[in-house]
Image: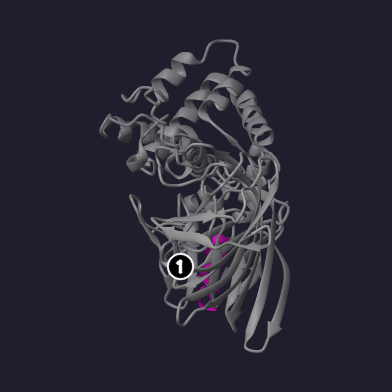
């Protein structure tokens, strides 16, 4: 009798979670917490220590993977306290086979010990991740740079809490996500411990190391701080001094600020091409702090990401307009509030520019290569302005507040926003969505 051929087993590592980043993310478990104990040597760019991931198994697991850079050397792995004999890190995946299978529904503790010289990952969008500065380091994680410095389940839908303990030589200051739980000196080093309790996507976890002085920013409904080189302090108050007023406006328009520990701005001693957002933190370069206030729209943009992108986060990268379109529209709202051009004037300005641009971008699914194209930002903002015109201000801003409340520290998609908006309009909004989100031609 002829035996039926066995079907080859499907590898979890080969399953694509998001076609925009087909090699990122992992199946079989759900992360809930990361605990890092690290040491960083600025002069030699050496990072060492451990990261312990707490997760729940969603299936019976004989093996599983984490996202991790090949530039780092893994020396030891423990699963539920037992040392693992079989593990390997290649192709940006750490593959782990515990001594006995992990049963579905059980909690897993995965401790990875490692060391190496972290470097950015090469991606479609340039160098992403852990990056050396002239005298320090930063992490720019969007969209897939987290594995450049810690093993993780790197996908925006995989949110978790964090504890980051890191030892750095004096007199460097470390800024990381969340509350500074402790700071203690140990010989020539300082041990910094940060705790981030709110569920956070891996790409929004950051580490900033530099010769920074800490300063507080005026009065605001939210505690606001800045870490920057002493030489930039004078210009900082000119460029960033209106942040408390921005915060007041955005709380009024978007709802309560979503993080308990407030907001921190880091200004590096180096120039940066673009600012960067992280959970509770925004990072700017010295070139954004020159006393001219030319970067004020970017300052508003990064602050708005704390609601749109960091708290309410896409589950799939194709929906990135829900981050960038909303943050771009916040720029226009700040301009309108602060005596600059109105949102309507900005909308007309960029509508003309988009009509003169290539008509080949689909906002609801721009493709990986174009997900950070400026047309996504501006067309996303124009979509919101068109919606505001249809709903009126009262309903439009009520919608934004419900959006940030319903999906606070969660994931959402374009269909979720469309469904929520339907409750604020007596007429069908389908033509608006079809023309702005699902057609390539600019309306």
| Crowd around label 1: few <14 · some 14–19 · many ≥20 (10 Å) | many
Q: Position of residue 295 (x, y in %)?
A: 46, 56
Q: Residue at x 31, y 35 (%)?
A: 353
Q: Position of residue 63 (x, y in %)?
A: 54, 49
Going by the picture, which residue comes out furthest to the top? Answer: 427
Task: Answer with the quarter of the image where residue 379 lies.
Answer: top left
Relative height, residue 39 to residue 23 (above, below): below
Relative height, residue 45 to residue 66 (above, below): below
Tell me if residue 238 is in the magenta stretch.
yes
**Residue span colored magenta:** 229-240
Question: Can the viewer see residue 140?
Answer: no
- Tell me the colour scheme of the image: one colour
Of the pair 253 and 99, the residue shown nearer to us: 99
Q: Residue at x 53, y 44 (%)?
A: 156
- Disc 1 secondary structure class: strand
Q: Residue at x 25, y 33 (%)?
A: 358
Q: Position of residue 75 (x, y in %)?
A: 52, 70
Question: Which quarter of the rendering shows the N terminus?
Answer: top left
Question: Which quarter of the rendering shows the C terminus?
Answer: top left
Q: Residue at x 69, y 83 (%)?
A: 185
In the rendered structure, the answer to whether residue 222 lies left or right of residue 146 reads right
Relative height, residue 314 to residue 84 (above, below): above
Residue bearing mark 1: 72
Task: Answer with the quarter of the image where residue 356 lies.
Answer: top left
Of the pair 350 and 424, the residue shown nearer to us: 424
Relative height, residue 216 to residue 332 (above, below): below
Q: Position of residue 65 (x, y in %)?
A: 51, 51
């Amino acid at each position: 009798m002829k035996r039926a051929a066995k079907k080859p087993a499907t590898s979890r590592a080969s399953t694509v979670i998001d076609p925009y980043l087909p090699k990122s993310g992992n199946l079989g478990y759900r992360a809930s917490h990361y605990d890092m104990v690290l040491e960083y040597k600025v002069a030699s760019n050496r990072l060492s220590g451990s990261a312990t991931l707490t997760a729940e198994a969603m299936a019976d697991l004989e093996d599983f993977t984490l996202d991790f850079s090949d530039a780092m050397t893994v020396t030891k792995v423990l699963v539920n306290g037992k040392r693992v004999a079989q593990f390997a890190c290649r192709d940006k995946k750490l593959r782990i086979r515990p001594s006995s299978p992990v049963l579905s529904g059980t909690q897993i503790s995965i401790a990875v010990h490692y060391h190496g010289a972290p470097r950015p990952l090469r991606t479609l969008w340039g160098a992403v991740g852990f990056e050396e500065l002239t005298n320090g380091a930063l992490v720019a994680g969007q969209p897939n740079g987290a594995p450049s410095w810690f093993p993780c389940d790197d996908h925006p839908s995989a949110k978790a809490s964090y504890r980051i303990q890191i030892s750095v030589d004096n007199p460097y200051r470390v800024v990381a996500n969340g509350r500074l739980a402790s700071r203690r000196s140990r010989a020539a080093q300082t041990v910094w411990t940060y705790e981030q309790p709110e569920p956070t996507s891996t790409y929004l976890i950051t580490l900033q190391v530099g010769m920074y002085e800490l300063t507080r920013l005026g009065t605001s409904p939210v505690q606001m701080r800045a870490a920057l080189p002493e030489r930039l302090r004078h210009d900082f108050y000119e460029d960033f001094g209106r942040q408390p007023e921005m915060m007041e406006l955005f709380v009024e328009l978007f709802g309560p600020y979503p993080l308990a520990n407030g907001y921190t701005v880091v200004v590096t001693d180096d120039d940066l091409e673009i600012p960067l957002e992280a959970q509770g933190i925004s990072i700017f370069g010295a070139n954004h702090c020159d006393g001219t206030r030319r970067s004020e729209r970017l300052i508003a943009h990064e602050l708005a990401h704390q609601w749109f992108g960091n708290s309410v986060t896409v589950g799939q990268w194709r929906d990135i307009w829900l981050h960038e379109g909303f943050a771009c529209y916040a720029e226009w709202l700040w301009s309108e509030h602060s005596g600059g051009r109105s949102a309507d004037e900005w909308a007309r300005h960029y509508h003309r520019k988009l009509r003169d641009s290539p008509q080949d971008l689909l906002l609801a699914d721009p493709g990986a290569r174009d997900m950070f194209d400026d047309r996504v930002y501006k067309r996303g903002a124009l979509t919101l302005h068109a919606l505001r015109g249809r709903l009126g201000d009262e309903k439009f801003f009520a919608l934004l507040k419900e959006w940030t409340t319903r999906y606070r520290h969660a994931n959402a998609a374009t269909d979720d926003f469309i469904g929520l908006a339907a409750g604020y309009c007596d007429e069908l909004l389908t033509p608006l969505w079809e023309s702005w989100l699902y057609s390539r031609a600019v309306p």
